[in-house]
Image: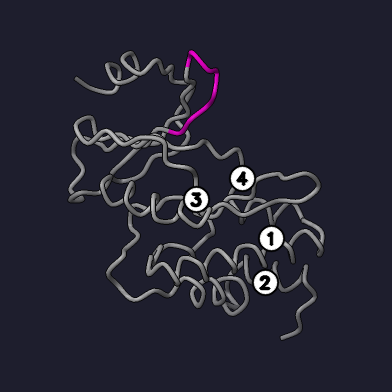
């Protein structure tokens, strides 16, 4: 079969590619009967990651149990496709560049830290909350923004959880990081 057959059988229409990585691609797709938008994560044929999308679906389902991450709608193990909620947001680092207010950022960080603690309590280590912040999206919610953690394919329910401590280091403790410097500048945190 393939992606085109999956789209046809499930009444989806591709809108555009929104992300691509070593093992997968993510597409924005419109569900034709409802008009709703979804994100379809499709494993590349040459992917060497074993059970990558099974892990993504399982980890996302667990995270969703605490209201974290995009909602999982479907997983097709034959076509190697995960269907999830489309998050209309921007990567955290790009949002920081736009200069959120102190109040907006403080609320965002508080909610993000709460999500990291919940992931730790679920024994689900995301594994990629640091770096450039591309796995944390800022979604508009009224006058504020809410954090949405995405991309759970490298997450683990077996290794020791470090979500909160990694996030703390990412946000506040890396002097060479744009994100850390900008967060401390906006929140007026002294060294």
| Residue 123 magenta-highlighted | no
User: Between 26 and 32, which is closer to the camera in this rendering?
Assistant: 32
Q: Quadrant of the C terminus?
A: bottom right
Q: Secondary structure at mark 2?
A: helix
Q: What's the distance in space between the residues labelled 1 and 4, CA to CA?
A: 13 Å
The mark closer to the camera, 3 or 4, is 3
Q: Which residues are magenta?
A: 32-39
Disc ID at residue 188: none
Q: What's the distance in space between the residues labelled 3 and 4, CA to CA?
A: 14 Å
Q: Secondary structure at mark 4?
A: strand
Q: Earlier in the sequence, mark 4 or mark 2?
A: 4
The residue singled out by tag 3 in the image is: 69
Q: Secondary structure at mark 3?
A: loop
Q: Earlier in the sequence, mark 3 or mark 4?
A: 3
Q: What's the distance in space between the residues labelled 4 and 2, CA to CA?
A: 19 Å
Dot 1 alpha-carbon crowd within 10 angstroms: few under 14, some 14 to 19, many 20 or more: many
Disc ID at residue 90: 4
Determine whether 163 is above or below 79 in the image: below
Disc ID at residue 181: 2
């Amino acid at each position: 079969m393939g992606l085109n057959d999956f789209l046809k059988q499930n009444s989806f229409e591709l809108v555009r590619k929104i992300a691509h990585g070593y093992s997968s691609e993510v597409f924005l797709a419109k569900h034709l009967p409802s008009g709703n938008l979804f994100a379809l994560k499709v494993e590349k044929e040459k992917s060497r990651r074993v059970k990558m999308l099974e892990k993504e679906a399982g980890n996302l389902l667990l995270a969703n149990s605490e209201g974290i991450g995009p909602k999982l709608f479907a997983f097709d193990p034959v076509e190697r496709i995960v269907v999830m909620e489309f998050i209309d947001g921007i990567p955290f680092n790009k949002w920081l560049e736009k200069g959120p207010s102190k109040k907006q950022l403080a609320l965002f960080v508080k909610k993000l830290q709460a999500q990291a603690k919940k992931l730790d309590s679920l024994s689900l280590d995301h594994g990629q909350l640091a770096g450039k912040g591309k796995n944390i999206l800022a979604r508009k919610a009224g006058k504020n923004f809410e954090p949405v953690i995405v991309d759970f394919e490298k997450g683990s329910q077996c290794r020791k959880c470090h979500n909160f401590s990694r996030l703390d280091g990412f946000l506040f403790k890396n002097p060479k990081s744009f994100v850390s410097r900008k967060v401390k500048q906006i929140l007026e945190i002294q060294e």
